[in-house]
Amino acid sequence: MDERDEEEDMWEAFNVFDQNRDGSITVEELRLVLAFLGLKQGRTIEARKRMTKKVDVDSDGMVNFKGFKQMMESDSFAGLSSSYKR
């Protein structure tokens, strides 16, 4: 898979989380998707806020695409990110 395909896959995954398509993932959008996927990460609001804060590159309390890529490439999301690879 080339870099371009990986970028497209990452955008596809980002759009799953960014349910209102405003370019940012809120703590609530994160909760909805993680719960739907049955993942243990982020079950509490505190955990989701910590996850978001780690990759909130512009300190607005949300995750943009750049931060999302960091999150997906981190160890805690290794299994999730591999599920979006073709």
Image (cartoon, grey):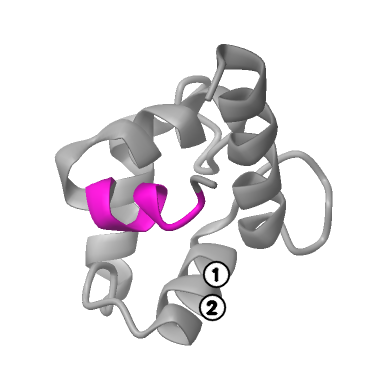
Tell me the SS state at disc 2. helix
Of the pair 83 and 57, the residue shown nearer to us: 83
Q: Which residue is mark 1?
A: 28
Q: Amino acid at mark 2?
A: Leu
Tell me the SS state at disc 1. helix
Q: Residue at x 60, y 50 (%)?
A: 13
Q: Is 13 placed above or below 68 here?
A: below
Q: Which residue is mark 2?
A: 32
Crowdedness of circle 1 by 10 Å Cα count: few (<14), some, many (20+)? some
Q: Position of residue 38 (x, y in %)?
A: 35, 85
Q: Which residues are magenta?
A: 78-84
Q: Position of residue 20 (x, y in %)?
A: 82, 61
Q: Residue at x 49, y 45 (%)?
A: 85
Q: Is residue 30 magenta-colored?
A: no
Q: Is 49 placed above or below 67 here?
A: below
Q: Are marks 1 and 2 in contact (CB under 8 Å)?
A: yes
Q: Residue at x 42, y 58 (%)?
A: 83
Of the pair 4 and 30, the residue shown nearer to us: 4
Q: Amino acid at mark 1?
A: Glu
Q: Residue at x 22, y 77 (%)?
A: 40
Which residue reaches farthest top? Answer: 3
Q: Position of residue 63 (x, y in %)?
A: 53, 39
Q: Is residue 83 magenta-colored?
A: yes
Crowdedness of circle 2 by 10 Å Cα count: few (<14), some, many (20+)? some
Where on the picture, by quarter, is residue 55? Answer: top left
Label 1 or label 2, whichever lies nearer to me, is 2
Q: Main secondary structure of the magenta part?
A: helix
Tell me if 17 is positioned left or right of 46 in this view. Answer: right
Tell me if 49 is positioned left or right of 62 in this view. Answer: left
Mark 1 to mark 2 CA distance (whole Å)? 6 Å
Tell me if 3 is positioned left or right of 77 in this view. Answer: right
